[in-house]
Amino acid sequence: MNENLIREAIKSYKSQGFRVIAEWNAGNDQCICGTKIGDKTQSDYQGIDIAELLNELVIQALELPSTGECYHIGSGIIDINEEDKVFIRCTAEFEYSDYSVDFFYEEIKSDGDNSGRLKDIKAIQNIEDPFELKKILHRANVNFSGKINKEKETETTVIIDVVQGDEITLSEEQKSFYKPIITEILLKGLEEFKKLETPLKKAENHYYFASIELEGQLHSDSTLHYKLSPSSEYFENFRDEVVILVE
């Protein structure tokens, strides 16, 4: 990339009174970035599409995402300073889901150590089995899954994973029976993890609790062995932040 050409172009646009504005909407499996020079969306300078080059610089400098669990939306004015550095002064919102961040928490322990880290909760719970699904466990796994967000919106699923023999399909009645059981576990887990949100914010400045996912399996003694996994989201809203595009 010809950095000197970019510097010359920005100086030329500036001398003509043209504002160079970049706008982007990145995330959700796409990365859209466009640069407008004056009232044009494209502008050639000595046969080079400077707008396209600036788009590439903005995407690279701001590390704009293209994955489905992130978004970065904003705009900024591209300019050049007295040191010949091309920069963008931008305002944007940035958010992404993070399934790996540790949640800081406090619990009373017998040894007096009240600090720790919690990522997953694992537990066992007795559940009713009116359809006697335990009788098929010799040839199939009965898997439970669910998700709940901080607004208490839930998703629940029960799947029979057959290892040997013919396929087994759950009826709507069976699915409806297990839904409130999974939902109750998720709601209890939500209350536990929401207690961690305040210490989490203290430890990780821009993180906050987002949702819980459940994975579980029915055992032959009519117990559900499950794991609750929390996820967090990172949010940052910045204004008039200067980022260098060309040194």
Image (cartoon, helix red, strand yellow):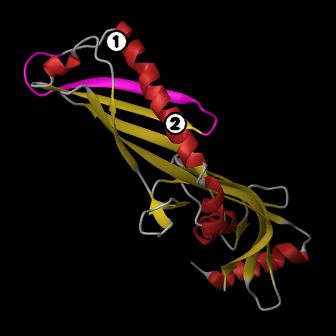
Q: Which residue is drawn at 64% across and 63% down?
A: 55
Who is closer to the viewer here, 168 or 77? 168
Left or right: 18 as drawn, with respect to 219: right
> What secondary structure is marked by label 2?
helix
Label 1 crowd bin: few (<14), some (14–19), many (20+), radius 10 Å: some
**If the image is split into quadrants, where does the C terminus sit?**
bottom right
Q: Does the magenta stretch include residue 153?
A: yes
Res 1 quadrant in image: bottom right
* Inter-mark Cα distance, 2 to 1: 22 Å
| Residue 186: percent from left, percent from top | 48, 34
Q: Residue at x 29, y 11 (%)?
A: 130
| Residue 10: percent from left, percent from top | 78, 76
Query: Looking at the image, which residue sits at the far right?
Result: 17
Label 2 crowd bin: few (<14), some (14–19), many (20+), radius 10 Å: few
Residue under pointer 2: 188
- Reply above or below: 67 against 205: above
